[in-house]
Amino acid sequence: MGSFNKQVAIITGAASGLGLVISHKLLNEGACIGLLDINEKALNEQFVNPEKYEELIGLDLTDQSQVEAAVARIIGRFGKIDILINCAGITGETNIKSHDVSAENLQKVFEINFMASFYTSKAVLPHMLAKNYGRILHIASIAGKEGNAGMLAYSASKAAVIGMTKVQGKEYADTGITINALAPAVIQTPLVDAMPEMQVKYMTEKIPMKRTGTLEEAANIAAFIVSPENSFTTGFTFDLSGGRATY
Ligand SMILES: NC(=O)c1ccc[n+]([C@@H]2O[C@H](COP(=O)([O-])OP(=O)(O)OC[C@H]3O[C@@H](n4cnc5c(N)ncnc54)[C@H](O)[C@@H]3O)[C@@H](O)[C@H]2O)c1
């Protein structure tokens, strides 16, 4: 028995980093979860006991028809969707000035960071409306609020996610559905490990607490945001930046 007992969640990017720890926290607290990731092999390695509470789905979230099929599969298996957490994301090329950014790379980043979160929220909202209850959390980034030099595609795509959160929060405010975002600074995950050292140094030095955030800190705040207790906050971007954000 836990605080998410009998709740059904969909978590994207569940095979790694933030999505992985948030998934384990919600599973430990009683949720049934559709775990979505393009890296099916890693999903199978990370979730070794999937029988009762887990539905592992390997898919490309940038393909809307695959997202719709995944949501239908989870409804078929668990009967409802209470929670959606969009963690899947990529940085694209970084440590690069705007005049050197390729349109292809920028589009690819938008496809996964913005479009995929649009596809998943569009697919789950009718099911949440039918029950008059839902919690959606889009993982954005401090880069979307402040703009990180060297990260045009990433920063702009996350700003778009924050914009979508504000719109969706207002649109469904008179239902039982809340829609919020989370803007972390640096949390050490494979996404950060893959970035140029200079870019990570630039981001970490901007954090007044002079450290990176922990996965546990990320999982704890995410769990609160998608809990029934978080009932009077919607369209809002929560902070997880060690003091970097001032608004
Ligand atoms: N780690 C940080 O410091 C940090 C800071 C701010 C925001 N974020 C955001 O948090 C989220 C999670 O980041 P992370 O650090 O855990 O990254 P990560 O690289 O550890 O995990 C991302 C997951 O997304 C999956 N994915 C990527 N493209 C996909 C696609 N097309 N279809 C399905 N799955 C796909 C990957 O396979 C991977 O498992 C991202 O949106 C990221 O932008 C992270």
Image (cartoon, rainbow, N blue to C red):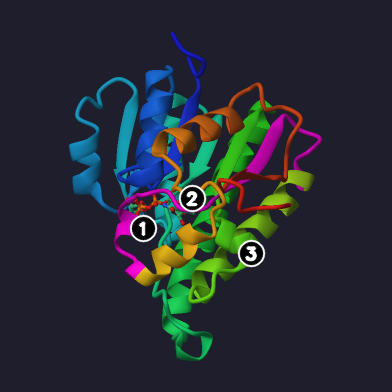
Counting from the top left corner in percent of width and height, residue 219 is at: 46, 34
| In the image: residue 176, left or right of residue 73 | right
Q: Mark 1 points at which residue?
A: 192
Q: Mark 2 points at which residue?
A: 210
Write the residue at 54% across / 60% down: 206
Q: Do labels 1 and 2 touch, CB within 8 Å?
A: no
Find out whether residue 193 is within the magenta segment.
yes
Inter-mark Cα distance, 3 to 2? 18 Å
Q: Which amino acid does label 2 sit on?
A: Lys
The quadrant of the picture occupied by the N terminus is top left
For the view shown, which residue lies furthest in the right direction?
A: 174
Can you tell which of label 1 and label 2 is closer to the viewer? 2
Please state which of residues 183 and 121 is positioned toward the viewer in this rendering: 183
Write the residue at 63% across / 40% down: 126
Q: Which amino acid does label 3 sit on?
A: Glu
The verdict on label 1 being within 8 Å of ligand 1 is yes
Q: Which amino acid does label 1 sit on?
A: Val
N-term-proximal mark, 3 vs 2: 3
| In the image: residue 115, left or right of residue 187 | right
The image shows residue 209, relative to residue 109, as above or below, that is: above
Mark 1: few, some, or many residues within 10 Å (few <14, many ≥20)? some
Q: Mark 3 points at which residue?
A: 146
Inter-mark Cα distance, 1 to 3? 18 Å
**Magenta region, residue range:** 171-197
Q: Quick one: SS at disc 3? A: helix
Can you tell which of label 3 and label 2 is closer to the viewer? 2
